Image: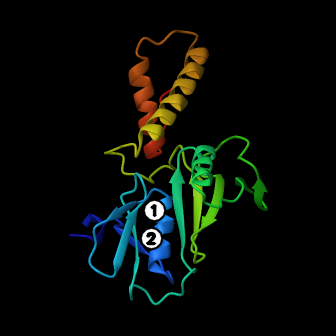
Amino acid sequence: MSVTDVGMQVEVAVIPVSDIDRAKEFYGRLGWRLDQTPPGVVQVTPHGSACSVQFGTDLTSAAPGTAKGYLIVSDIEAARAALVAGGIEVSEIFHRGPDGPIEGLDPERRSYFSRATFSDPDGNSWLLQEVTARLPGRVDPGPTSFSSASDLANAMRRAAAAHGEHEKRTGEEDPNWPDWCAQYMVSEQTGAEPPQ
C-alpha cells in the first residue's frame, strides 16, 4: 500500500482564542453549528463544511489572533451582505490583480479572484473567497455535491446562462438541456472540461 492509497480528509482546524465564551458567541453569530464536544473544547462547523473549527483550553500553544483560514462561498456579495446583516465587520470586496489587491469584484467574476475578509474578536482572520468553478484536479471527480440550496441555485443559474450561450453557438435548440446543464455543473465542481 502506498501513502496515496490512504484516504485523508481534514476534520478539524484548531484556532487560538483568549476568551472561549466570547469566541463561542461570535462564531454562533456566524451561524456556525455548535457541535457536541468534550469539556473544555468548543467545536463549531461552518454551514456546508465538512471541516470543523475547535478552540478551547490548552488545544494549541499558538498566540490568540495568529490563525488564518479560507472560507469558500459561491456568491461573495450575498455572503458579505449576510455577514454584515448579522453584525459582523467585513472588509469591502476586492479582487486579485497582478500587483496586489484591487477594490471591487473581479470584472470577469473569475473563480478564486473575488474576496473579502473578517476577523474574530481575537484577530484570527478569515478570507472569504468566491469559488464557482474548481481548478482541474482540485476535487475528486467521483462524488459532487452542493453545500446548500443557494449554492445549487447559483450553479443552476450559471449552467442556464452557459447553456444559452451553447445554443447561440450551435444555432439550435437543445432538447437535452437537462443533461448538458448537469454535465456543466459537475465540470465546475471537479475542474473538468465543460460540455461543448
Disc 2 marks which amino acid?
A: Lys
SS under mark 2: helix
Instruction: Locate residue 77, reporting x and y percent.
Output: 63, 45
> Label 1 is placed on what type of residue?
Gly
Give the labeled residue for mark 1: 28
Quickly name the residue at label 2.
24
Packing grade of label 2 (10 A; few <14, some 14-19, many >=20) is some
Looking at the image, residue 13 lies above or below residue 101 = below
In this image, 148 relative to 78: left or right?
left
How many numbered dots are placed on residues in this image?
2
Q: How is the image coloured?
A: rainbow
Residue 40 on image: x %, y %:
33, 82
The structure residue drawn at horizontal position 57% and vertical position 19%, both measured from the top left corner, is 164
Query: Do tag 2 and tag 1 residues touch (Cβ < 8 Å)?
Result: yes
> Residue 128 occupies which quadrant of the picture?
bottom right
Q: Position of residue 72 (x, y in %)?
A: 52, 54
Q: Is residue 157 left or right of residue 24?
A: right
Residue drawn at the location 60% of the way across and 52% of the way down: 112
